[in-house]
Amino acid sequence: MVLLALAMVGASCATLGSGGFNGKPADIYSVVPNQADVRTLLGDNDWWVGTPTFGVLPLDSMSTPTTVRFWVSQPYVHLGTAEQMLARYTVYDKASSATSAMSEYQNAYGTSPTSPKVGDQVLYYGLQGSSAAPFATRTFVRVGQIVVLIVWTRRDAIPTVAQLGKNASKFVAGLKDLSKVHARSTPVDPNLLPPPGLDITLLGSTQLPVESFVVMILAALPDPILALMRGGGINDFAYADYALNSDTHMEVQTGLLTFPTAADAADWASTFSPGTPDSNGIGGAYLPIGGSPAAGVYHYIFSSGKYGALVVCKSSIDGEAASRECEDPMKSTALAWKLALGGLR
C-alpha cells in the first residue's frame, strides 16, 4: 500500500510554538469524515473505514521536524478493489509554516490546478502507476495552520478535478470554524487498554465500528467475517494507538472486542489466531503484506474472559517492514494486558 508513504512527504510533529489553534488530536479527529460520510461522498457502500493514527510524539520522534504540533490520519478501503483513500490532517505551529509546506509540495510535484478553490490554498496532482489501483491523486488543502492531504488510488481512471474539489470540500468542512472543533467521543476506559508499562506510549484512543476491526486484521474476505461478528452482537470495539518505545518508527495498535460470553471470545481467538498459541494462550506471528521490498506486520491475538484482543505492531509508513524490535515488547504487552483483563491490574 502506498498511501502513508505518499502522506509522509513533508510530515512534521509537535512543538511549543504559538498558533491560532490550540486543540488536541481528538479535536481534529472529530471532524474527519466517518464511514457513512465517505460512502455518501463516493456513492458506494463498499467503502470501509480503517483505524486512525494519532501522530503525536514520540511517534517518529527521530525523523520529524518541529514546525508541526501533531497530525491525524484516517485510511479507507474499497472492498472488491485495491482502491484506497487516506486523509492526513497536519496541524502546524502557525499559518506561515503551513504556507511554507504548501510551497514545498508545489516545488516537489510541479504545476497544479488551483480551482475549484477550497480552503485558503489548494493543490491537485495525479499520477499513474502499475498496481491494481494504478491511478493515484494527491490533494493538498491549507486552512489556516492546518494542511489536509487526501490521497486517493483508483482502478480505472484519474478522477476529474471537479470530483477532487468535491472530496476536498468534504474533508475540510469541519475546519471552517476552528473555535467549534471539539472532540465528540470520549477516550476508551483505561481499564480496557493495556496497563501502563515501559514498552509503549499511548497516543490516543476511541471507539470504532466493527468494520474497522475487520480491516485491522487484514481479512481477505471481510464481508463474511463482519456478518459473523455482528451475528455475535459485536458492533464496535475499543481502539488505541501507541508508539513503540524501543523504536518510535513503529506504531502499535490495539483492538478489544467484548463478546456475549467467554466461550464466544475463546472461539474467536482460536479461529483468528495468526499462529499456534503459546503457554499463555497468546497466538502471534509476522504476517507478510507485500510491498517492495517485502513488508509485514506483527499480530498477536488472545482472549480473556468475555474479551477478545488484538495487538498489531507495524511501521508508521505503510509498505515498510515492521522492525524485530516489536517482538519481545509485544509479547510482554499482550501478556500484561491478558492478565489485567482477567482482574490482575
Image: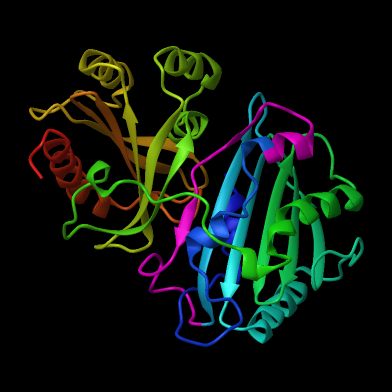
**Residue at 76 percent of width and 59 percent of height:** 139
Asked whether residue 211 appears in the rendered view, the answer is: yes
**Residue at 70 percent of width and 40 percent of height:** 38
State which quadrant residue 165 falls in.
Answer: bottom right
Q: Main secondary structure of the magenta part?
A: loop
State which quadrant residue 239 falls in.
Answer: top left
Query: Furthest residue to the front?
Result: 180
Percent x, y of residue 97 = 64, 83
The residue closer to the viewer here, 56 or 130, is 56
**Left or right: where 53 falls relative to 143:** left
The residue closer to the viewer here, 191 or 314, is 191
Percent x, y of residue 245 = 26, 63
Percent x, y of residue 96 = 68, 86
Percent x, y of residue 43 = 79, 32
Q: Is-magenta flag for residue 49? A: yes
In the rendered view, would you say 205 is above or below 284?
Answer: below
The scheme the figure's colours follow is rainbow
Give the magenta range.
37-66
Q: Quadrant of the N terminus?
A: top right
**Residue at 81 percent of width and 67 percent of height:** 122
In the rendered view, would you say 332 is above or below 268?
Answer: below
**Residue at 90 percent of width and 47 percent of height:** 160
Q: Quadrant of the C terminus?
A: top left
